[in-house]
Image (cartoon, helix red, strand yellow):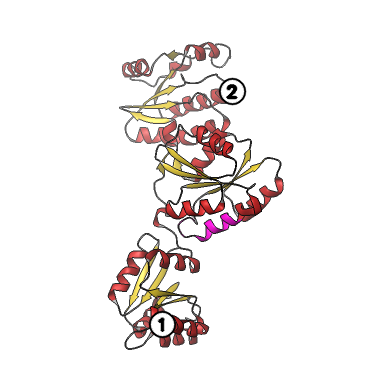
Amino acid sequence: MRYKLLTVDDSKTVRIIVRKAFKGFDCEILEAGNGVEGLAVASKEMPDLILLDVTMPVMDGVEMLTKLKSDPALKGIPVMMLTAEGGRDHVLKIAKIGVRDYLVKPFKEEVLIEKAGRIIDLKPLSEAPAKAKSIFDPADILIVEDKPAIIQQIQEGLKHTPWKVHGVATQGEAIDFCSRTPPDLILVSLSLPDESAFTLFRLVRTNVKTKYTPVFALVVKTETTQQQQAQTLGFNAIVTKPIDLGELETKMAKAMNLDTSQRYYALEGDTLVMRLPENCAPAVLAEAADYMKPKFAQAVDAGQNKVVIDIHQLKSLHMGVIKLLFQAMQTCRDLAMQFVLVGSAQIITECKGFEDTRGWTFFESIEEAKANLSKSPAPQLASTT
């Protein structure tokens, strides 16, 4: 939902400051130079919030506020008053007319955003639908955990990623960190004293800079009551201890809306290369399968009809992998794409132990596989014979 904000102020400078402050948010800024103009714009546009100056010519802020609150169609619009330092007491006196908050001039943009964010659900433009960032892009991860060993375990488990993993031990440290560098994702231990994990979650959600930041709960597997409390409160995910780091990484990437397809698919020249990592857990296979048809179709749409299916990094073959490979081969056939397999000596040996895979033909390297594809103008159906 795109919100409308009406700023009513005779100072063009103040109106420019307001427009600049909300530039990074999904909202429309309306302007008026006095109370008469403000009432006209409010009646026509029905804004979601009015920023109203107290001292203005023609009609001042107090008179405009009084007329707003006496109009049944407009009285529900929340109003924030803007006043000079000496007018603070005056604003407090008229608060009973119906202002939601006030701001003393000169003010900082971040204070204006914070106060407005308490009244309407300000959404950063970066949260609007857009192309997802890549899994290879950097990100800041914050862990709030009073057990250093857990922080170290997660840092070690994610060191292969471009993510920078920060660790703090208390709610106060976490708040300070978020104010300096709003993280891309937060993991909070529910075992922090005095239920400070839940207090921190509420504070994160009321701060306009972090209200859309994914927050994961870290909790011992047997603490079901804490898990239920976290789910009720609205944590994005529950991560149980002992931590499955592979599953955690997958959940984090999904929560941050990262494009993870590059883990498995890459266009190299005129060939689409599909790669499987050494450990293909169910979550990995599911992720690779989700991207398969779109990536293959995208390659065909771009004029590419060659596929190398590279499984040489696999530590071992199992039925989940075999099922995914059959799916990839069938997709190639459906799209009339040529395909070949690349595998290690161990994988080739293991394939001979399965009836469905013992006839598969492998190449030892991607270069050799690509060279073979270049020689074959027709779809490579012989790869499974």
Total numbered circles: 2
Dot 2 alpha-carbon crowd within 10 angstroms: few under 14, some 14 to 19, many 20 or more: few
Q: Nearer the viewer, residue 358 or 121?
A: 121
Q: Magenta part of the protein: which range?
A: 199-210
Q: Is residue 73 visible?
A: no
Residue 39, percent from left and from top: 39, 83
* Residue drawn at point x = 48 percent, y = 11 percent: 345
Looking at the magenta stretch, what is its main secondary structure?
A: helix
Residue occupying image coordinates x 44% and y 84%: 90
Decide which of 37, 308 is in the foreground and name it.
37
Q: Amino acid at mark 1?
A: Gly
Task: Kindly identify the amino acid type of the residue bearing the numbered disc 2.
Answer: Met
The image shows residue 372 at horizontal and vertical percentages of: 35, 15
For disc 1, the marked residue is: 87
Q: Which residue is mark 2?
A: 319
Residue 326 screen position, x and y as percent: 51, 24
Residue 218 falls left or right of residue 209: right
Q: Earlier in the sequence, mark 1 or mark 2?
A: 1
